[in-house]
């Protein structure tokens, strides 16, 4: 039988769109505005507060905003908040707007734009995870680019020195290639001490190498004396399912038509990956954030929803926060053409969000 929300979605009229939105709001917004308390805030409580979010992908992480077909519009913040998400992850390609020579100035116009996006999202009641994304040069020549990354963080820290606790920083998206986890481990303390000068208590997100793979967490070294850190990993397994038919890979993309799951072992192996992470988290007493997980729109709709629900459940059952990749581009959950959410996926996330309300890892994790 067709679900009520689906029927509303299928109706072309604007009235239905409005009704749909209010149904979603009623369904999901048991989440109040995410709020993060003051200096003595427990980092596990911060991770619970950011809960379920979405990536504002392909906007400020494109070489120039708009170049990948999507630009941030102010109304997006409220649309996301109204759908029940607690936070946005904001990927930003700072390196494309930072001079290549010392003192590595960030273009002030770009800084202002990022500031505007952050403020708009905060004002809408969302937490924001602001990162450094697609810093291609540091992946290939880490040693030469370390000072540039440090300068970028010094400027971001200064710009956002008065920001509320609902703003989180993430030091670097997906260290990869030449930037191995061991090289990255050596940079982390320097970057942290720079940021901590102005942000002693702000929550900071850090992941390991090989594109923030879960397997690298074991090698990741987070300074023991900094307890305001959230560990992150990204999850796109099986890649031949999540990335079927996409057009941005350097290699030939996996062919379209791949289903999920193909057999029972697939769900079992996902579970075992998440178990490895939760064991790592318990041993290291760190909260965990699945900062990216998503499926291209080229996958069959029902399989896509099933995969997202599977991953979101595995994450929230273990008290991990999460952010779907992404809002309104190739992996998008919302359509800028219709102004509507993908209801099946929102419903899947909704069921997980309601569980999240009750899942809080104990303090001695
Ligand atoms: C990249 C995106 C890409 C996504 C899915 C992200 O980490 O930054 O450009 O679309 O992964 O592959």
Image (spheres, helix red, strand yellow):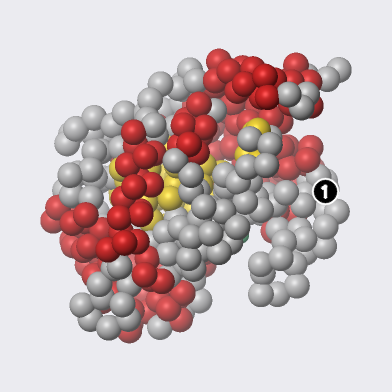
Look at the numbered disc 1 and say if its residue's Cβ is closer than 8 Å to ligand 1.
Answer: no
Task: Examine the rendered structure and indicate whether residue 280 appears above or below residue 322.
Answer: below
Quick one: SS at disc 1?
loop
Q: Position of residue 261 (x, y in %)?
A: 79, 45
- Between 156 and 53, the one nearer to me in the picture: 156
- Position of 345 with respect to 284 (left or right) is right
- Between 119 and 246, the one nearer to me in the picture: 119
Q: Position of residue 56 (x, y in %)?
A: 50, 48
Q: Quadrant of ligand 1?
A: bottom right
Q: Looking at the image, which residue sits at the far front?
A: 14
- Between 127 and 19, the one nearer to me in the picture: 19
Residue at position x 52%, y 52% from top? 71
Q: Position of residue 194 (x, y in %)?
A: 18, 62
Task: Name the image quarter holding residue 141.
Answer: bottom left
Q: How many marks?
A: 1
Q: Position of residue 264 (x, y in %)?
A: 79, 43
Task: Name the image quarter holding residue 97.
Answer: bottom left
**Which residue is under mark 1?**
259
Task: Examine the rendered structure and indicate whether residue 364 appears above or below residue 153.
Answer: above
């Amino acid at each position: 039988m067709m679900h009520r929300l689906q029927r509303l979605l299928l109706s072309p009229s604007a009235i239905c769109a409005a009704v749909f939105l209010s149904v979603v709001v009623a369904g999901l917004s048991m989440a109040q505005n995410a709020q993060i308390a003051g200096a003595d805030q427990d980092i596990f409580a911060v991770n619970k507060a950011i809960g379920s979010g979405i990536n504002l992908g392909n906007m400020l992480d494109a070489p120039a905003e708009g170049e990948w077909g999507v630009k941030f519009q102010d109304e997006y913040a409220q649309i996301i908040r109204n759908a029940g998400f607690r936070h946005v992850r904001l990927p930003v390609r700072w390196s494309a707007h930072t001079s290549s020579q010392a003192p590595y100035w960030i273009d002030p116009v770009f800084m202002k734009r990022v500031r505007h996006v952050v403020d708009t999202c905060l004002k809408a009641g969302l937490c924001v995870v602001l990162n450094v994304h697609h810093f291609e040069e540091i992946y290939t020549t880490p040693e030469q680019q370390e000072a540039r990354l440090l300068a970028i963080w010094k400027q971001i820290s200064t710009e956002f020195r008065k920001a509320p606790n609902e703003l989180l920083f993430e030091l670097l998206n997906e260290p990869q290639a030449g930037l191995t986890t061991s090289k990255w481990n050596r940079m982390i303390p320097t970057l942290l001490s720079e940021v901590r000068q102005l942000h002693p208590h702000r929550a900071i997100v850090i992941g390991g190498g090989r594109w923030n793979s879960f397997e690298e967490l074991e090698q990741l070294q987070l300074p023991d004396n900094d307890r305001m850190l959230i560990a992150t990993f990204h999850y796109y397994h099986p890649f031949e399912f999540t990335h079927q038919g996409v057009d941005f890979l350097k290699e030939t993309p996996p062919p379209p038509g791949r289903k999920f799951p193909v057999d029972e072992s697939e769900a079992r192996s996902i579970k075992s990956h998440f178990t490895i992470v939760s064991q790592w988290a318990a041993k290291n007493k760190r909260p965990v954030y699945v900062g990216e997980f998503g499926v291209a729109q080229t996958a069959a709709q029902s399989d896509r929803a099933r995969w997202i629900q599977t991953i979101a459940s595995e994450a929230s059952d273990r008290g991990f926060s999460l952010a779907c990749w992404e809002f309104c581009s190739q992996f998008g959950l919302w359509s800028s053409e219709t102004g509507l959410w993908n209801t099946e996926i929102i419903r899947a996330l909704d069921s997980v969000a309601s569980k999240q309300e009750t899942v809080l890892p104990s303090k001695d994790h």
